[in-house]
Image: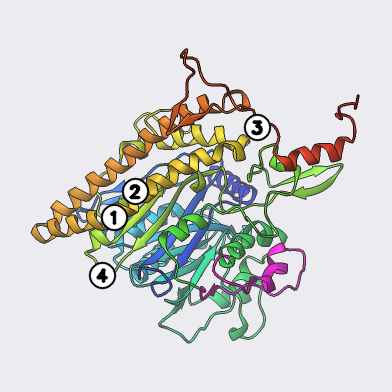
Amino acid sequence: MKRIVLVVFLLVSYFSSWACTNFIVGKKASADGSVICSYNADDYGLFIGLCHYPAGKHEKGSVRKIYDWDTNVYHGQIPEAEVTYNVIGNINEYQVSIGETTFGGREELVDTTGILDYGSLIYIALQRSKTAREAIKVMTTLTDKYGYCSGGETFTICDPNEAWIMEMIGKGPGRKGTVWVAVRIPDDAICAHANQSRIRTFNQKDKKNVMFSKDCITFAREKGWFSGKDADFSFCEAYAYPDFSGRRFCEARVWSFFNHFSTDMERYLPYAEGKVKDAEPMPLWIKPNRKVSVQDIQECMRDHYEGTPFSLDKDPGQGVWNMPYRPTPLTYKVDGKEYFNERPTSTQQTAFSYVAQLRSWLPRQIGGVLWFGNDDGNMVAYTPIYCGNTSQPECYNTKGADAVTFSMKNAFWVCNWVSNMVYPRYSLMFGSLKSVRDSLETSYFSAQAEIERKAMVLYDENPSLAIDFLTDYSIDKAQQMIDRWRQLGTYLIVKYNDMAIKPDEDGRFIRTETGLGATVERPGFPENVAREIVKSSGDRYAVPEE
């Protein structure tokens, strides 16, 4: 009974928050030849840092206990692998990286008796896989044997040579296994998914670039969800049809990502808007009109639909200071009629965000970098975490800190402390945060080549020396970030106290000759807000002419 209640709760949580966004870049589409993938882990109340699973050898008969990634509820156990690989965050020592977004799909297909949830499946696969293809095999084989207790998921599964998207959904209570399809993204293409199943028809004869479960199509036929020719089968339409919510709250994020790298997205706008039932759906991937960098993907993870028909700067929800965030739930009622908020990629409920950079031409422990942040991607500086790292920075794994325990040593809480000051006074304060954020990230990228050159020298002497060097470097940069963020927090409190602005030079507040604080600036309303007030209130606040 508890398991059934748990699954229902999780489904409600998924559908109400429309969590998570992933972007994927093939190695020939990227600026430096790396495979790039990203993940925003979004859910209200979610507190999570940077995990670490050390490499290990395990005796025959050892077991792995499975605790639900979202709830920590115990599901059961499976045999442990004889050998497991080092995992730091969502990347392992072989530069395999896995992310996800939940599409939910048909609720009746959740197997309440299954052992493996989607989160546990990710980290087990990372511990057992040297390539993306191997990870797909591990994930599908394990769910066939031990059952899958989550809703429908889209997984990003990448290594330094290949990028894959896999969609998976269970078969219902008491029926082990999943129906699934995995498609390789072309090397010269980019792809994205954001809580809506995206794989439609697929080339069932292309064994090199497409994999799928034997009953992927027959199961849908058995259930009465598909009756056409096999070649016309659409995974998306059979198992998770894109209704208005799936398109406007989810596919719109994909549309916006593609729109950064294409001049042809106008044709798909009716589909992303969600109001035209038979609108042309977007392709699974596109070829970008320019090479895509890690920094480009970081910026895309910060997207609020700026400059598009979905932009959040055209209604009173933005508040006085043009906030590109909206309160949840996504829908609300006024006089019995339902309305909605836009749901961009950058959102306040992000627990952690990363961009993975996977490079085949470097030694594996040096080639993989997880650019990591422990809050909304727009409000953090992504710090470098190398895939061979053997320990986490304290700020990303802070003893005593949790979802209801604040700590000034913890990046999640310090970053949220700062971002929650900025959100309601966004246009007033965000520039100060952005300046610090961009300065830190610029320093990380500027130092990257030299740091990796030093690591290569050490690697030639002894690979463990390079691993230790990069671990220490990652820890130092993360701790530097949180130190700077604590300074930023106190700076923001002083500078913008009482909705005024204290003048400063180079971060030092200006004083008068007598030692007092300099006269503050009072910015008043932004012009667009002042005009809206006059428009809505007429002459109520007009000063009488004398």
Mark 1–mark 3 distance (CA, rounded to whole Å): 40 Å
x then y, percent, for residue 250: 62, 59
Q: Quadrant of the C terminus?
A: top right
Q: Is residue 226 left or right of residue 124?
A: right
Q: Which mark is residue 523?
A: 3
**Location of residue 137 by image quarter:** bottom left
Q: Position of residue 165 (x, y in %)?
A: 47, 68
Comparing labels 3 and 2, the label whose residue is closer to the camera? 3
Task: Tell which tag, 4 or 1, sits nearer the viewer.
Answer: 1
- Which residue matches tag 1? 448
Q: Earlier in the sequence, mark 1 or mark 3?
A: 1
Q: Earlier in the sequence, mark 2 or mark 1?
A: 2
> CA–CA distance between discs 3 and 2?
32 Å
Instruction: Identify the residue at image location x=66%, y=67%.
Output: 241
SS at mark 4? Answer: loop
Indicate the secondary structure of the residue bearing disc 2: helix
Tell me the kind of residue under disc 3: Pro
What's the amino acid at mark 1?
A: Gln
Counting residues from the N terminus, which is met first, the one under dot 4 or under dot 1? Answer: 4
Mark 3 Cα within 10 Å, few/some/many (few <14, many 20+)? few
Q: CA distance from mark 2 to mark 4?
A: 23 Å
Which span is picked out in magenta? 260-289
Q: Looking at the image, is mark 1 or mark 3 nearer the viewer?
A: 3
Is residue 181 visible to the viewer in this orientation of the structure? Answer: no
Instruction: Indicate which disc residue 508 carries.
Output: none
- Asked if the stretch drawn in magenta spans residue 280, the answer is yes
Residue underneath mark 2: 443
The residue that disc 4 covers is 361
176 on left or right of 343: left
